[in-house]
Image (cartoon, grey):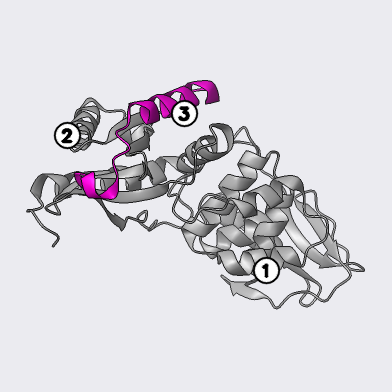
Amino acid sequence: MPADTPRTPEQRAYEVGVRLRPGTALLTGWAALRLAGASYFEGLDDDRRTPLPVPVLMKHEARIRSPEVIVERTRLPLPRAARLVGVACVPGELALLHEVRRAVSARRAGVMVDMALAAGVVDLDRLREAARAQQRLPAAASYALARACAECRSPRESDMLQVWESVAGFPRPLMNREVRDLSGRLLAVVDLLDVEAGVCGEFNGAAHRSASRQSRDEKRHASLRGVGLETFAVVGSDPERVQVERMAAARDRAAWAPPGKRRWQVGAFVPAPPLVVRDAHEAERDAVMLEHYAALDARLAGEPSGRP
């Protein structure tokens, strides 16, 4: 391999994968999920710089020597391999279970599950079925599977949802939904929607930091308040206490209007745009989301009344 080959997560996974003897070992964990197309799994430690070892599922008697590898052993037959970029990998559901077993916290495990679902590399029903066959699943993994959400589009949205449910104790909201007025005109696509209370919440990340974006955000919030919805926003630096206070305050202000009295309606779920570059890093993902938000803003500015 040329010395100047970029050490992307895909490259690191591939280099280990091609060394595995057929029938004795498979890539698993973050490496298998990344090769399947789940961009969240970057193979990095909490500092976002230190590479994590490449996880491998091996037969109990097989051996491999490499400081770049962490081994998960099994006395059972290996699962049927999924061939990804020419490398034999554990199927997505089992790879995710191996990864969440090593999660440093229940919150992190929850984000892992949500991001694998968002990428479409696992099926929730098959994931829970695979989990039932596991012995002594860690508490963090059990939590993540029980509260899994397939509607989060980013790790920060998953974090916000988990604070809403697990810390504040509020019921499961809808995520990433259109909100329309009664004529069908699109008002906004919101990160979090508490239908019963009439509350919208958003995580304001890098895509929301420019002055023009903040101005558009305020217009959107004004449009939502104009039809009787309360709003709140959180940013990455907000501690849990502040997030919960904002969430609770919005619910206290909310109208709690019954369905027949609401001046708004729930529209469609809006998934995140796919990444064109499979090994995209955080800055590239932010750029994709900025373009995505610009397209949504164009819809808000130019869509005629009524659904298209």
* Residue 122 can be seen, yes or no: no
Q: Pinpoint residue 158: horizontal percent, then vertical percent.
A: 50, 43
Measure the alpha-carbon separation of dots 2 and 3.
27 Å
Q: Nearer the viewer, mark 1 or mark 2?
A: 2
The main secondary structure of the magenta stretch is helix
Which residue is label 1 attached to? 129
Point out residue 237 in the picture as x, y percentages from the top left corner: 48, 23
- Quarter location, residue 61: bottom right
Residue reaching furthest to the right: 61
Q: Which residue is mark 2?
A: 226
Residue nearer the viewer, 178 or 11:
178
- Give the residue type at disc 1: Glu
Q: Give the number of the mark in front: 2 or 3.
A: 2
Question: Type of residue at label 2?
Answer: Gly
Rendering coords of residue 211 (x, y %): 23, 25
User: Which quarter shows the N terminus?
Assistant: bottom right
For marks 3 and 1, give the CA distance. 34 Å
The magenta span reads 237-264
The numbered dot on residue 236 is 3
Q: Earlier in the sequence, mark 2 or mark 3?
A: 2
What secondary structure is found at the residue carrying circle 3?
loop
Is 245 in the magenta? yes
Q: Nearer the viewer, residue 44 or 128?
A: 128
